[in-house]
Amino acid sequence: MNPLRLAQIEMFCAVVEEGTVIAASRRLNCVASNVTARLKELELLVGQELFLREKGRLILTPEGRLFYRQALPVVSGAQSLTDLFAEGSPRGILNIGALDVALEGYLPKIVPDFLTACPGVELKMFLRPTYTLERMLTDGEIDLALTDGPIVHPLIESRFAFREKLALAMPEDQKGARDGQHVFLFNTDCFYRRYFETWLERHGVSNAIIHTVESYDVILACVQAGLGISCVPHSILSQVRRRRREGIVFTYPEDLKGSEVYFIWREPGLNDLGRRFLDHAPTHPDTHKK
């Protein structure tokens, strides 16, 4: 069975609203015979007579009235789709994924300006760890990501956003990382976890008991209680309440430098809305000051 076509439905509604085939053809800028043919096709497809034909007049049948009521939102919706981008201002749904450090310290400076300049854009932002963001980008789930870089990949392009520093968090009565101690970190798909594990190995800390805790409040509470150590991105630390910092010493070791965070997108190029978003991002911001 052939599917209904939008042109058939539009012609049907035009005949109902104009009263005659001739008037409907003028409105639609087509010949009357074309309208008549489309109406007959439509009746064959739905298996009902939609009009009574009496001496050149077309009168809606009960089935025709029902069909017209159901058809109106279809025609109206099609017209709204045609006009969706007619105003000239940017419209669309822009999907952006970001690390927590970008959402906390960097994006709040960009998003309000972008949405003010592009009020027709619907923004969807996702908090995800590094390796998940890369997968989402290559799978086409997001248009743009803010993640650790630089990334060398034939299908990904990038631009520097900011540098994120890492703070070593230890109980105030502890002088340094100890072998076999407890360590509180985010999940294994977090770049900073792998970075800090490598740092611990370089400092001879082996046999550490690493706890996976996806909450900085809980992590810092454990450090505060003297149970172990952790590392915390500076942008997150700057948001931590003073009470949660008590009893913890935060230092910035030279060899715990953190990482550079980049905007990344798929090749062969970033879409128009993504580029507009990038236009609102400073190229070399002094994002995190000590």
Image (spheres, rainbow, N blue to C red):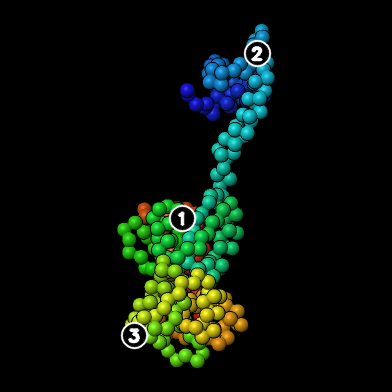
Circle 3/circle 1 CB separation < 8 Å: no
- Separation (CA) of disc 2 from disc 3: 91 Å
Tell me what residue is drawn at x 55 percent, y 79 percent. Answer: 221
- Separation (CA) of disc 2 from disc 1: 53 Å
Q: Which residue is farthest top?
A: 55
- Residue 87, given in percent of the width and then of the height, sits at 58, 45
Eye-nearest disc, 2 or 3: 3
Quadrant housing residue 183:
bottom left
Mark 2 or mark 3, earlier in chain = 2
- Relative placement, left or right, of 277 versus 137 is right
Dot 3 crowding, Cα within 10 Å, few <14, some 14–19, many 20+: few
Tell me what residue is drawn at x 58 percent, y 24 percent. Answer: 11
- Separation (CA) of disc 3 from disc 1: 40 Å
In the structure shown, which secondary structural element does the residue marked by tag 1 occupy?
loop
Disc number placed over residue 194 in the picture, else none: none
What residue type is disc 2 on?
Answer: Leu
Along the viewing direction, whichever of 212 and 11 lies nearer the viewer: 212
- Residue 138, given in percent of the width and then of the height, sits at 39, 55
Residue pointed to by mark 2: 52
Q: Is residue 134 above or below residue 17?
A: below
Mark 2 or mark 1, earlier in chain = 2
In the structure shown, which secondary structural element does the residue marked by tag 2 occupy?
strand
Residue pointed to by mark 1: 142
What residue type is disc 1 on?
Answer: Ile
- Relative placement, left or right, of 238 versus 194 is right
- Residue 47, given in percent of the width and then of the height, sits at 56, 18
- Relative placement, left or right, of 4 versus 258 is right
What residue type is disc 3 on?
Answer: Gly
Residue pointed to by mark 3: 204
**Residue 17 visible within the image:** yes
In the structure shown, which secondary structural element does the residue marked by tag 3 occupy?
loop
